[in-house]
Amino acid sequence: MNEIKLFSPATVANVSCGFDVLGFCLEAIGDEMVIRKTANKGVKITKIEGYDLPFEVKKNVAGVSALALYEAANPDFGFEIEIYKKIKPGSGVGSSSASAAGSVYGMNVLLGSPYTPLELTSFAIKGEALASKSEHADNIAPALYGGFTLVKSLEPLEILQIPTPDDLFAVVIHPQIEIKTADARKILPKEIPLKNAITQWSNVGSLIHGLHTNDYELISRSLEDVVVEPFRSQLIPGFESIKKAALEYGALGTGISGSGPSVFSLCKSQTTAIKVEKAIRKAYSKYTIPFEIYVSKINMDGIKKLN
């Protein structure tokens, strides 16, 4: 195989209570990429469609992660990368991680798949750090593994796959404003009250248990963020209106996707998710901000090859 075309999905990070450690993969939106072998050594980005992103490899997240893998593999050929960007940068659903994870996934396949998903995550983190100014894997991991993932640690890197209940759906609204991850990190407090910390790690533990046992009620009671949401929600116009509408129409819980401005709602069943989507659409239409909204099943496969 000399060329691969792939779908690199959007992801939701943090999942309310799991700041920097929890994430899940979406089906409804993602980037497309083409990776091909070239006779000349090195990595080049030859095409970008959708958004204005740098072609210079060391300034592009897909390029930085690709270089990390390329230097480790040291093949006697090179790679070209084409990026068809469908996820808006700064949208809060893993735009940078889709690029970073997609490039290393495609290169790995063309190399004969010598690297594990964990090793690919370690390469992709280098690209993600370019966008967010810090290494974190809560978007990278679900893109590469699929489903829900927990980042047990970064040093050493350890990723845990978490079971996903069959009837779990996500509704994601993306107000058309940009919030840079680095900026969203700056507003977070350096210290938090012990009471809030206890509540937060209790919610993380019970959410993981709820996912393992298909306990939707427990999942619902666990989707509470007392650490990050009180600060970041101020950056998202209409956040409380979105949350109120979603919960009134049966969402299990609603929270900020990554650093925002996208907001996710987890729902039991597609039927409920469609009701929640309509309620959020109606509530947010009162604002003057354009938005996109979609319903997605949890993507259990992560990045996949396209024909």
Image (cartoon, rainbow, N blue to C red):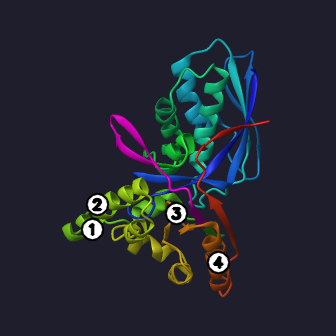
Query: Counting residues from the N terminus, which is met first, the one under dot 4 or under dot 3?
Result: 3
Is 97 above or below relative to 81?
Answer: below
Residue 307: image location, x then y, percent: 80, 36
Residue position marked by numbered label 2 in the rendering: 201
* Comparing labels 4 and 3, the label whose residue is closer to the camera: 4
Query: Counting residues from the N terminus, which is met first, the one under dot 3 or under dot 1?
Result: 1
Circle 1 crowding by C-alpha within 10 Å: few under 14, some 14–19, many from 20: some
At horizontal 56% and vertical 45% (from top left) the residue drawn is 143
Query: Counting residues from the N terminus, which is met first, the one under dot 1 or under dot 4?
Result: 1
- Give the Cα distance between marks 2 and 1: 6 Å
* Direction from residue 198 to residue 255 in the image, left or right: right
The disc at residue 199 is: 1
- Give the Cα distance between marks 2 and 4: 31 Å
Residue position marked by numbered label 3 in the rendering: 257
Magenta span of residues: 149-171
**Split into 4 quadrants, where in the image is the N terminus?**
top right
Residue position marked by numbered label 4 in the rendering: 275
The disc at residue 39 is: none
* Direction from residue 236 to residue 44 in the image, left or right: right
- Give the Cα distance between marks 1 and 4: 30 Å
Residue 117: image location, x then y, percent: 51, 33
Q: Residue 278: say if magenta.
A: no
Q: Residue 166: say if magenta.
A: yes
- Give the Cα distance between marks 4 and 3: 20 Å
